[in-house]
Image (cartoon, rainbow, N blue to C red):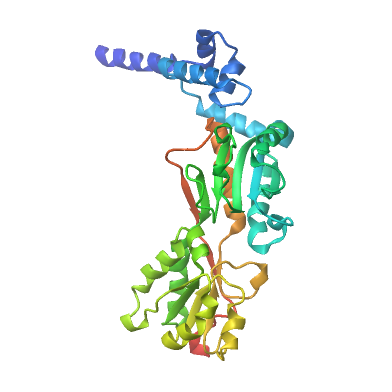
Amino acid sequence: MIKGKTDVSVTFTSSMNKTTLKDLALALNLSCSAVSSALNGRSNIPAATQERVRKMAVEMGYRPDARVTQLMSYLRTGKGSRNAPNLAWLCWDIIGGDAETKPWLKGFLNGARNRADELGYAIDLICFTSSQFPPHRLNSIFAARGIEGIILSHPCWPSPLDTNLKWSNFALAELEGMEGAPGMAHVGSHGTKCLQTVFSNFVRLGYRRPGFIVSEWVNQANGSQWTAGFLQNQRQLTAEDRIPILESDDWSGLLAEWMQTHQPDVIVCVNNEIIDQIKSLGYRVPEEVAVVHLNLRSDVNGWAGIDQRHEDIGAAAVDVVTAQLNRGERGLSKFPKYIYISGKWVDGWTCPPRTLQ
């Protein structure tokens, strides 16, 4: 029993004598606020000092108190955006403020803004073309606006990673449709899961010969998740009902032959003009050929398909960046996180139950 009491005492004493922020500051001859800023990667602390602080923290076995971190995050939320670092919603080569007006883009931004406001952050929308000013000028713009986190939004070509931006200064995330920024956390729609949902509804609605039409650049921007999901779920069909994917940036010129050859009873797509093009070939929609859209927004209101939940994706991107800020993480990662949001099926007139036709 005596030995047991001794073991308990040793364990208790060890847990109580852990290194504190004050211990670390004394060892480094720095203030507690300077050490905290260095550990959190604040730009006001020289890189050499940040490295020295991190090295000493490892040597002394310093670990931040999770409860204090949580409290500080809560206090930031209550103080409002003026006391928190700003975030940048960065769009490349967008003309006319598309991020705020286009149905397939604005949902991401709206969701991000709402989530940032809940957390006490502000988001600056920065959209420009490379012809307006050299991309490296963003460094001074970000510094002037107090920006410490960046969400790289699509469309964003050419890749801004080819510029002289100082990515090591910022918490980073890229959005759905990018796949061009290695080293950034990625937040987007779960494409393969979306196709699984689509196929389960085909079974429910009575369709047996689905076809898929997609442009090459859309498929590439999506990381080929949609085509992978279609091919995987197509395996549940009989061999004679498996229609090859029509993947081409000029698929409209191939549509007539593809339709005549394969006779799909439902078409999966991400193109708003597909119904008019099918009708121009003499097919009735949805009586003869149904249509499912993989990115339902206000411009295809009433269609059947997948709501990718853009607002939730935008909010998740803010969560990723602010979590990095709270942990003091900056720059590109060797092992970036990938976060996918599952879309939801929406019934619509373009794909009614076949038993009722």
Q: Is residue 270 above or below residue 138?
A: below
Count of numbered badges drawn on the protein:
0
Residue drawn 38% across the image and 15% down it: 14
Return the x and y of residue 289 as percentages of the image width and height. Answer: 52, 85
Query: If the image is split into quadrants, where does the N terminus sit?
Result: top left
Res 87 quadrant in image: top right
Q: Residue at x 57, y 53 (%)?
A: 313
Q: Position of residue 325 (x, y in %)?
A: 57, 34
> Viewer-proximal residue, 271 or 53?
271
Which quadrant of the view contains residue 275?
bottom right
The residue lying toward the viewer, choosing from 320 and 124, is: 124
Q: Percent position (x, y) of residue 286?
A: 56, 85
Residue 80 makes an appearance in the image = no
Asked whether residue 147 is in view, the answer is: yes
Q: Is residue 58 above or below residue 311?
A: above
Q: What's the residue at 60%, 37% (across, down)?
A: 165
Give x and y (percent) for residue 291: 54, 79
Q: Is residue 255 above or below residue 31?
A: below
**In the visual, does 207 lie left or right of 124?**
left
Taking depth in this image into account, of 20 and 289 the one nearest to the observer is 289
Residue 143's place in the image compared with 28, above or below, is: below
